[in-house]
Image: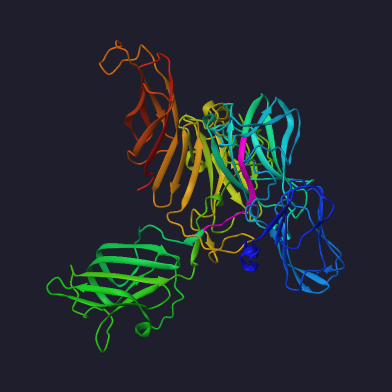
Amino acid sequence: MAGLLKYDLDFQGEITTSSATFLFESASIVNITVSTCIVTIPSSLPVGTIKEVRKLGTDESVAITIASTGETFTRDGLSSLTLFNTGSFLILEKVSSTRWDIVQSGFIEENENNFLKNNLSKQSLLGISQSGSLTISWDSSATDVLNTGALKIIVPSGTSQYVDFQLRNLHPNEIGQQWEIKTSYKLNTSADDLVSFFLYDGTVETPTTLNSLPYAGGTLQTTSGSVVPTNTLNNVKLRVRFKNSTAFTLYLADASVGPYVATSGAAISNWTSYTPTLTNFTASVINVKHRRVGSNLEVQGNLVVTAVTGDMGVSLPMGLSTDLATGGSNGPAVGVVKALDVGSNFVAGSVYMESSTVVRFLSGGVTPTAFRATYPFTWASGDTLGFSFSVPITQWTNNVNLATDFQEFAYNTNTTSSNDTSSFGYGPEGVLVPTSTSQTGLIEKVVNFIRPPLPTDLVTIEIYNPSTGIWENGPLAFPRNYQNTYQYGMWYSYDGTRLSVMFGRGGYVPTGTTYGSASTATWEALQTANYRWRVRKISNGNMAEISSVTINKTTTPQVVEVGAGIIESGSNANGSYVKYSDGTMECWGFASTTTSSSSVNLYGSTSGLTYYASAARSLPATFIAQPSMACALIAPAAVGYTANLATVSTTGYLIVVGSSLDNAAVITVAWLAKGRWRA
């Protein structure tokens, strides 16, 4: 802690009993572990004395009082100081014979970035309250969630049930910024959309992006979300609300609520081909590509020239320009160029900015000359021009946001055929498409993002296809079509204030001479088939601009170095996955199957003493080529069991398990796959 380093406060005393008064002269640090106490500073201490008082007791309903003997605190002449929050501290310095000043205040390091009083990392029910007929206990046997166990919440069927986790009283600096919520959990029922997270300030429940925890096969999951809080400083709670028609059990552990850490770094994109506008020359082969590096554009090109009529120029990609000072041939050089005469040698030169959008080429020498019809040689068909240059781009800043939490999902919870402008939902699970058998007009469903869309955001309607298990681009799967007065498909409109998702008469134009004649085209039929929709907003998918590298915390800023940024992550019944901006994807999860005496063994028959089983499983996301994959046996933990991968494809795998001990052994493996999700 900064105070310890600055003032060398190394001798500590501890208050462990509820004594009314505690006089300290030799201890530099006083740790108070009791609920209530008065710390009295004697008047005999010399000017320049440094004292630190820490509150470590968990009861925040009673204050620790710091008093003195005939002396005051701060320039305001206070007779005493108080500490309420667990983990809070005051560092005091005696600046005169009659006054102490507060040198530093705050929270000790282990608590400063987690506002929760109870982070569910040890057996404790302090700071937890509930509504409904919930049964809450600490389950020390739930070591698959955390080594020390987990909070076990048995949720009976019912409505309006929730658990509140108390936040410490907040500092004004901690309001008005984005907060991050993290937790580990496990559900014991095969249903999604049961658990939602909110911030409750005593009046308003503010929704977080953790609007629904997925079941994820009942395995341990670690999740994170975000929320923008209200301006309430005291008695704010993290509320976990349950939406259930049947009973279930939830395990929670290792929770935190604190300032969001926005990880930023230089933008480095992949090389992309483009066709530039050529000035005063033509080419039969144009091979030009560009990429972004921070705020600079890098371009490499090679062209086979057919004819030249004047000073040769090449444009930047459409929509980009540079604010680099231009001045024709007197402007700064930004790259190199090489001209190759097919009947002779090559000539090297430099690239310069002719204008904010066009580069031209100069030969070297005492008197540089622009590349033109007769210079640096008489151009003929088949001659080549190669170049490479880098220029700062006006539209780009130095850094981009690479954090995954800048991905946000929203939808409208109303699944009827009526318009709805206020039923807002959040989270990746989406909602069923609306029901409509003969809608002649349009259905409007308004969605609301916690952070409004920006011009640099990428917004996409997505629809879940239950036959493939994949979220697809909605307007591509169900494009907007017209027939007479009817409209089909889905699309959205945005007026700068609200985003409206529009549903036509049916999901798609059915076959037949009359549009709408096939019942499978209606949204109602698609709803019955469990089609769902959502709107995804990505603020880093298209390199959303930020002004500088920033760690958005109340403590000292720092720079975080990053590699390939995560652009998407998720989980489903098949496992979890992470997609990186460089095209790499990792998938992982668990798979189980049961051995049988009727399964064919390695010898091609069902005879023998070893029992086998095989199981085909799907991956949680699709690779573009066969990934590298490995698996490991995790249960039963005994000799005599085996597990191997038989086949691996872009979409799934086959595991083969064996047991020399048990005809009906349930064998569980953990697996990991790594490959590419794009070229």
What colour scheme has been applied to the protein in the rendered image? rainbow
Residue drawn at (34%, 34%) of the image: 649
Residue 390 vs residue 636, the one in the foreground: 636
- Say which quarter of the image contains residue 67: bottom right
Vertical relation: 383 (above or below) 407: below
Residue 507 vs residue 319, the one in the foreground: 319
Query: Taking 175 as reference, is 252 left or right?
Result: left
Residue 373 vs residue 64, the one in the foreground: 64
Residue 415 in picture, x, y percent from top left: 64, 34
Query: Taking 120 as reference, is 166 left or right?
Result: right
Vertical relation: 651 (above or below) 554: above
Query: Taking 311 as reference, is 493 left or right?
Result: right
Residue 502 in picture, x, y percent from top left: 60, 42
Would you say the magenta stretch is mainly helix, strand or loop? Answer: strand
Magenta segment range? 252-263
Q: Quadrant of the N terminus?
A: bottom right
Vertical relation: 434 (above or below) 678: above
Residue 234 in picture, x, y percent from top left: 78, 51
- Say which quarter of the image contains residue 108: bottom right
Residue 587 lies in magenta, yes or no? no
